[in-house]
Image (cartoon, grey):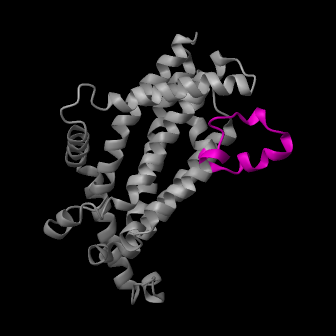
Amino acid sequence: MAFSSSAFNPFVDGEDRRHAIRAARKDFVQGVMAWRMWLSLGIQDVRIRYKRTYLGPLWITASMAGTFIAMGMLFSAVLKNDVRIYLPYLAAGMVAWGFLTSVVSDGPGAFVSAQHIINALRLPFPVYVLRCIVRNGIVFLHNFAAAWAAYFILGGSLKPAFLLLLLTMPLLFASAFFVGLILAILGARFRDLGPSAGVVMQLLFFMTPIMWRPEDIPDASKWWVTINPVHHLLEVIRAPMLGGWPQALSLEIACGFTAALGILSFGLFCAYRHRISYWL
């Protein structure tokens, strides 16, 4: 059964609207402030996933390192790029993209997988999404270290641009949280969202400069790179990782994209927060 018209306008009058917004805002703030809870849950998920393994999440890092080394050697030859420049570029892009992909993959099931807890306990809904962010963020940080190691091994050096990561890294995590919340709400209602989101991410992977660079394609085709907000979000992470400064346009679009996601996620949360438990 799809959304009804009343679902898109669930408030009877202004007082009900204000009450729903206050309740959603309170739940949202309480969820973010309960950092010990979602941090512990996310760490526990990683420990359970890699229980009795010698390397733990480093297995994913080893797999990622092997992938970008092999692909870097291959595509640098195919695209006739210097491997010392192309491989760190590919590694940085794949690490940031892998984090976003894992959040999009886990996001639709954030509430569904925790339905027994949601039905038994009254916890703020953002806790379950932040748990997903922590779980995937730990893997991201491991992979981030591997990509940075590749940069230094191939001749990179410390540069002032690295400090920009102190600002752009929280931007990436904020975007991931807002995307995860949107997908968690919609995924609780539409169970086909998970597979369809995976298909979209596969298509977007090939349309985003990760394996290739914008300068590798003709100027006439660069417009769809410019309007791709995911490219700019990746670029504000990748450029500082490689010791460079991202373009002002990338910073502006990344910030605007994150703000738009935040507004959309909070709007959906206000409108449908009271229905999530009934959808599970």
* Quadrant of image for the N terminus: bottom left
The foreground one among 172 and 13 is 172
Q: Position of residue 204 (x, y in %)?
A: 61, 50
Q: In this rendering, is residue 238 above or below 112?
A: above
**Quick check: 230 left or right of 141?**
right
Residue drawn where x is 13% and y is 68% of the image? 120
Q: Position of residue 63 (x, y in %)?
A: 42, 30
**Quick check: 82 left or right of 143?**
right
Residue drawn where x is 39% and y is 90% of the image? 12
Highlighted magenta segment, given as a residue range:
205-230
Question: Quick one: which residue is furthest to the left in this view?
Answer: 120
Q: Can you tell which quarter of the image residue 123 is in?
A: bottom left
Q: Position of residue 177 (x, y in %)?
A: 41, 51
* Quadrant of image for the C terminus: bottom left
Residue 240 seen in this snapshot: no
Q: Can you tell which quarter of the image residue 142 is in?
A: top left
Magenta stretch: residue 122 in it? no
The foreground one among 99 and 11 is 99
**Quick check: 155 left or right of 19?**
right
Q: Position of residue 70 (x, y in %)?
A: 56, 25
Residue 253 seen in this snapshot: yes
Q: In this rendering, is residue 276 above or below 85?
A: below
Number of numbered callouts drawn? 0
Magenta stretch: residue 222 in it? yes
Q: In this rendering, is residue 173 above or below 27?
A: above
Residue drawn where x is 43% and y is 47% of the image? 102
Q: Can you tell which quarter of the image residue 238 is in?
A: top right
